[in-house]
Amino acid sequence: MRATIMPKAHDVRIDNVPDAAIQQPTDALIRVTRACICGSDLWPYNGGPNVEGQRMGHEAIGVVEDVGSDVQRIKRGEVVIMPFANSDGTCMFCDEGLQTACVHVDFFGNGKLDGAQAEAMRIPYADGTLYPLNVSEDDALMPSLLTLSDVMGTGHHAAVAARVRRGGSVAVVGDGAVGLCGVIAAKRLGAEQIIIMGRHEVRLALAKEFGATDVVSERGEEGIQRVRELTQGFGVQSVLECVGTEQAIDTSMGIVRAGGAVGRVGVPHYEAIKGAQVMFYRNVIVAGGPAPTRAYIDELLPEVMDGRIDPGRVFDRTVGLDGVPDGYRAMNEREALKVLIRP
Amino acid sequence: MRATIMPKAHDVRIDNVPDAAIQQPTDALIRVTRACICGSDLWPYNGGPNVEGQRMGHEAIGVVEDVGSDVQRIKRGEVVIMPFANSDGTCMFCDEGLQTACVHVDFFGNGKLDGAQAEAMRIPYADGTLYPLNVSEDDALMPSLLTLSDVMGTGHHAAVAARVRRGGSVAVVGDGAVGLCGVIAAKRLGAEQIIIMGRHEVRLALAKEFGATDVVSERGEEGIQRVRELTQGFGVQSVLECVGTEQAIDTSMGIVRAGGAVGRVGVPHYEAIKGAQVMFYRNVIVAGGPAPTRAYIDELLPEVMDGRIDPGRVFDRTVGLDGVPDGYRAMNEREALKVLIRP
């Protein structure tokens, strides 16, 4: 079968690899009908840690082709969402809704598991991992449904970790797909003021359509001052940190109000959270991490199905597998916001 | 009047100072009937930052002697708890129950405001700051009532920040008065497993009486391993960090479970929270800061009054003002756990 491989930075290839196949009785095999490229795929693309023979892609919707002998809930022929991490569905962390801490967790596209930017995938712990949908494989809602695999769930996780409250003030750091989904999440949780921090006009326009009330395009100390001006000098109650750079976390800590919370979902490219004393004296909370998107589908799916939220609008380009390498280039150059793949 | 001054490290004096007096119409004047020495007083005692002419003490119960012309709620003759920080009671932070972020907040005994280890004090924003009690000034519950000024409220804040839950697992880092109150707080919030980390036998025995289920006396990596052994290798859901040293926060981050929370109430003597990536991948929350003890009195007072909790047991020595310098020495040498003062 064909799959996306990234042997080294800036080298994305569609290669022939051994066909995905059931290996464990708890596995399922899916034919990938929709996948996409994630902002986090750009870290290895730009020289971040590369795993030998790395299979790329961790967001997918697919059709179940086969299931192992111990799979009970998931059936052949079902259309399923594949969250970006597998989870057994039975351990105490899964019970608590933190599937990304499952005792059997692993991440798709990490070199050990199959990648989603491919024709097919083996899915470990299929019963715990996959979420069956009641739609046909080419339903018009596919782009929005696909975001429940990662970016919409991740934006929601940022909002939950940042304790977004009804009537509250929010800043979203980053105008990528996750940041934009963070705006949707903050809006649906009832935030009154939603400040988007970014510089890309098309994305900022979309953020406004999603519910952003203010735009701050300044960076660093200037950006912090601007947010403070917009919040009577206090900062916001909730910061959704959707980038992961040191500048992004520094900005987040600078714009959060006393008693407020920073929800981090950008994969951190820094070693320590500075300002431990200021954070203490202001009773600031820092939370977040890999989103248990599997847990959030129950809450978000009905709103996707009835059109109350439309996170699929973050996709502005669709390619086949052959178009994936250029999709990486386009996202990396910020020419495309998020690339949908129909393998 | 007489008050406690600490001009420099290891130099605690009882000096004559100008009588406390009303300065603003929102002030009250109290005669201090009970005060105490705090673990945090030992930081400047041991060379931490010293403020010129620093008045010491931030925990008190007193009798209102006089009130300014704008004071409406607090009356002359009332017995009142003085939380360790003043608060106006009207700003948005006070409204939210985070009085330690009040727009007019200041800390008693900080060199700008009067200290509590004295005969009398001026109390700014008396209506917002003071909490009137319905007891006589020598009620037998005075030791426990006094802890609502700081240590019991602070232990409770650690538990709230660490999201202690019914049936949950908790570790309390530190066997000082705040740590012991943290055990009380965790117990009353329904924690099932409460691990106290400390080495002082008398204090650990008291921790057990307060509800601790396990004791870990090892430190550093060894202590972390020991807590993990006690928690099936996972760590605890809630860590109450009641010390403030770099070792204490490192230990806290090492023993918290994925999805768990560290509630910091030890004044931090470190600049950054290390392990920002591990913290992220494990979805660990870090929260806490100066406790809004004013807000917690409503919840804790009834349990003190009816004897359900007895945090006053942390006091193991009582002195008059003349005994204060030796009280510092005794607490510093861990000969006394917490020293009560009857000025």
Image (tube, coloured by chain):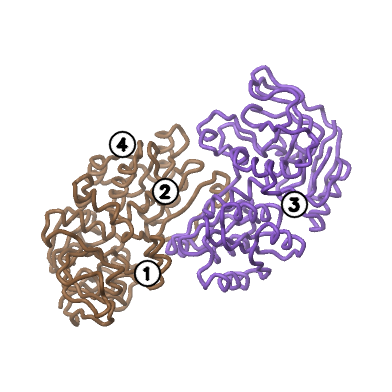
Chain colours: A purple, B brown
| Residue B328 seen | no
- Badge 3 density bin: few <14, some 14–19, many ≥20, Cα 10 Å: many
Dot 1 amino acid type: Thr
Residue shown at 60% from the left, 72% from the top? A226
Q: Which quadrant of the view contains residue A242?
A: bottom right
Which label number is shown at residue B213?
4
Q: Mark 2 points at which residue?
A: B162
Q: Is mark 3 on a helix, strand or loop?
A: helix
Crowding at label 2, few (<14), some or many (≥20) Cα neighbours within 10 Å?
A: many
Report if residue A135 is visible in the image: yes
Q: Which amino acid does label 3 sit on?
A: Val
A186 to the left or right of A341: left
Q: Nearer the viewer, mark 3 or mark 4?
A: 3
Comes first in the chain, label 4 or label 2: 2
Q: Residue furthest top?
A: A69
Q: Is residue B212 above or below residue B296?
A: above
Q: Which mark is residue B90?
A: 1
Badge 4: chain ID: B
- Amino acid type, mark 4: Thr
Labels 1 and 4 share a subunit:
yes
- Residue B124 sits in quarter: bottom left
Which residue sits furthest right? A322
Residues flagged by tags 3 and 4 on a common chain:
no
